[in-house]
Each structure stands twice: as C-alpha cells, then as structure tokens.
Amino acid sequence: MEEISPGLENVYIKYTELTYIDGNNGIMRYRGYDINELAQKSSFEKVSYLMLFGKFPDEAELKAFKSSINKNLALPDYLKDILRSLPEKSDSLGILQTLLSAKASEEGNYKYDRENDIVKIPEILGNVLSMVANIYRLKSGNNIIDPEPGDSYAETFLKACFGSTDKDSIKSMDSALILYMDHEIPASTTAALVTASTLSDMYSSLAAAIAALRGPLHGGAAEGAYRQFLEIGSPENVNEWFKNNILSGNKRLVGFGHRVYRTYDPRLKTFKKYADILSKTEEQKNILEIARKLEEAGVNAFGKKGIYTNTDFYSGIVFNAMGFPVDMFTTLFGLSRISGILAHITEYVETQERLIRPRAIYRGEKERKYPE
Ligand code: ACO
C-alpha cells in the first residue's frame, strides 16, 4: 500500500558531505568545521570554496577565485534595463528572482563538472553580488553601478551598497554570509535540487530556489522578528505585549522555534555578538534591549517545550545596524545562500545524479464519459 509523506518530512533525497546539524545539541558544522569558528576565523570566499570544492583554497586558488568573482561584477546592460523597468512596488527578493531568471535565458545547457564549475560559480557569485547591491541602490533612490572590487566579497558588497563602510560592518557581513550559507536542504535548496536534477542550468536552479525562499513559511522570519520589535516600541512594553499577543495564543513569537533545533540555534552566538558591537545609536540600542527582554520572556515560556531562539531573532538587528532596511533582510539571506545552494546542486548532479521525480497517489474520479 503506497503512503505519502506530507511535506516530505523525514524523506531523505541525497547524501551530503556539506552540512551536519545536531538539532538536540545545537551543533552545526560545514564539512566538519564548527560554524561559529568559521564565522570568526575565516572568510566568505574561503568557506564558499571549502563548501564548493571540498577543501580550503591555497593562496593561488584563493587569488584566482577572488579575481574571477571580481571580473564578473558588471551586470550586462539588459539586466540593468530590467532593473530600471520593474514597478516601484516590486519587493527586493522578487527582483532578484526576476534577474536570475533573465540571466538563465542566455545560459543554454550546462555541463555539470568540476572544470566548468570553477569558471561558472565565481561568475555567478560576482553577478549576484552586483544584482543584490543594485537592487538595494535602486530601492533607496540611487543609480545602478558596476561595483568596484574591495579586499573581500563582504567589503565589495557593502561599498557597492553604501559607498563606504567600516571594519565592524565588513566583519559582521562576512560572518552573516558564512552563517547563512547553508542549512542542509530546506525548501529553497530542495527546489534548486529538483530543477538541477533535470540538468537545467545553475541560474534557473537559483531562480527556483529564490522563488521558494519568498514564501512566508520559509524566508522572512528575520523581517517578521524585527517588525515585532518595532511594534513593541520600548523595553517597558515587552511583558505586556508578550502576554497579550503570545501567551494569549493570538500570535507565534517570530524568531522562535525550529523544525530541527530543540535548543538554541547555534548560529545565534555570532549574530548576538555582532548585534551588540554594531548597535550604536539610541534607536539601535533600544531595539536590542527589546529583543533581549523578549528573548527572556520567550525562553521562560517555551524553553521547556524545546522552543528556543532561532538565528532570525537577531540577524535583522545586525543587518539593520549595517544600514539595511527591513525589506532587504530576506534578500541578504538569499545572497548568503547562493554558494550553499550551488554546493548542493553540484554535489548532487555530479555524484548522485538521478532525476527527482516523486509520485502522487491518485484519488480522483474513476473513468468518466465526456459530457456531450
Ligand atoms: N511561538 C509560539 N509557539 C510556538 C512557536 C513559536 N514561535 N513555535 C512553535 N510553537 C509551538 C506550537 O504552537 C506547537 O504547540 P502545541 O504543540 O501546543 O500545539 C508546538 O510548538 C509545535 O509547533 P509546530 O508548528 O508543529 O512546530 P514546527 O517544528 O513545525 O515549527 C516553525 C517550526 C515553523 C519554525 C515554528 O517554530 C514557527 O512558526 N516559528 C515562528 C516563525 C520563525 O521564527 N521561523 C523561522 C524559522 S528558522 C529559519 O528559517 C532560519
């Protein structure tokens, strides 16, 4: 007797050597390395290379990887035209999805192998940096530019967005890019895997991933958590708000709970550190204080059920303190996820290739006559 597994829960569709998660003990590792150690000591470029190619790059490999990314920072004119022509109300993640699809239109068939990947993947990383930076620029009333290469991916990105940046923001951005890079195979990465399993090209697979990320059940929790803090307005209002909105059962506490973790999300540690370092204005400190009080109330109420703070509770505070508006949070998450998604699709197609084609159990009408 066939059975379905709703939401594909507990269905395994690939082997992976990329990300290990122990949800009961709050452990997360990329290729065996602790996630917070990587965020502290490494860089986005090195960790991307590790995820994509299985080892840290040596000096020459790192130089070549960075230089290929930097050669691909200028968007083709037709993408700039598309950017300018989209309606003002378009949301930033929707624009990213559109640009990735547009780029896919000139791709043709892609032959998945290591020799092609080492050329194609840095091209994509350069392109997507420029797409996201220009989405931010356009939405904040600035002109579209070809980003100038900085010393790192994080620096290039922040300078492209804001014109200038500082050491703490660069380190925080670099860490955020690493912490959000991969999380095994959530809905977005699975959408990319399904697409790539047909041997569709990388940009099409990424567009599918971003389409899945857009839904409120997946991306968007960092935005939701931050909007919660804005609604509360002041640390003195936290307990009252929590009682009326959360304990009453009217709403879920956004930034709390996770399908995999039964304790604190391990990525939180580093996000909390940078939330503390970057929150300098009175307004930023106020938001951070609200978050801390709300976290305490949430852990007191739900900790015994295994519901703890997830990474999105603090990541929005970090992104906002760097200068990004709430509408950009999920798009920054998307930018960070690109190399993780590419690592999963190349790992799958190049080592375990099999078209992903599940079945559905038919339970409709039996054979019927067409009404004459
Ligand atoms: N606030 C209050 N109660 C919660 C929360 C929460 N944030 N999360 C779970 N619960 C409760 C549920 O009400 C339910 O209680 P019950 O058993 O008494 O009915 C119980 O915990 C189990 O909830 P489920 O929805 O079955 O748990 P699931 O594992 O499916 O939920 C999810 C995971 C969707 C993330 C959930 O915790 C949630 O909605 N959180 C808020 C949104 C959020 O922060 N999302 C970000 C996820 S992390 C990320 O994407 C990086």
Image (spheres, grey):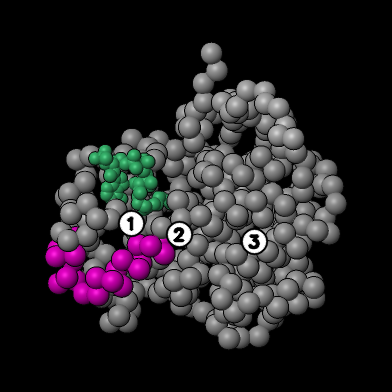
Answer whether residue 104 is magenta in the image. no
Residue 194, compared with residue 369, is above or below; it is below
Judged from the image, the secondary structure of the residue bearing numbered disc 3 is helix
Please tell me which residue is depicted at 71% across the width and 37% down the height of the picture.
197
The boundaries of the magenta stretch are: 222-242
Label 3 crowding class (10 Å Cα cut-off): few <14, some 14-19, many 20+? many
Q: Which mark is residue 254?
A: 1
Query: Ligand 1 within 8 A of label 2's CB?
Result: no
Place of residue 64 in the rendered image (x, y in percent of width and height, measured from the top left): 74, 58
Is any atom of residue 109 visible in this view? yes
Residue 178, compared with residue 147, is above or below; it is above
Q: Which mark is residue 110?
A: none
Marks 2/3: CA–CA distance: 15 Å
Query: Ligand 1 within 8 A of label 3's CB?
Result: no
Q: Which mark is residue 220?
A: 2
Label 2 crowding class (10 Å Cα cut-off): few <14, some 14-19, many 20+? many
Please tell me which residue is depicted at 33% across the width and 35% down the height of the picture.
24
Label 3, on which residue? 97
Look at the image and tell me in which quarter the C terminus lies: top right
Instruction: Work out whether mark 3 precedes mark 1 in sequence or the reverse, and give the earlier one.
Output: 3
In the figure, residue 269 lies in which quadrant?
bottom left
Judged from the image, the secondary structure of the residue bearing numbered disc 2 is loop
**Taking 290 as reference, is 107 left or right?**
right
Query: Ligand 1 within 8 A of label 1's CB?
Result: yes
Instruction: Work out whether mark 1 precedes mark 2 in sequence or the reverse, and give the earlier one.
Output: 2
Q: Amino acid at mark 2?
A: Gly
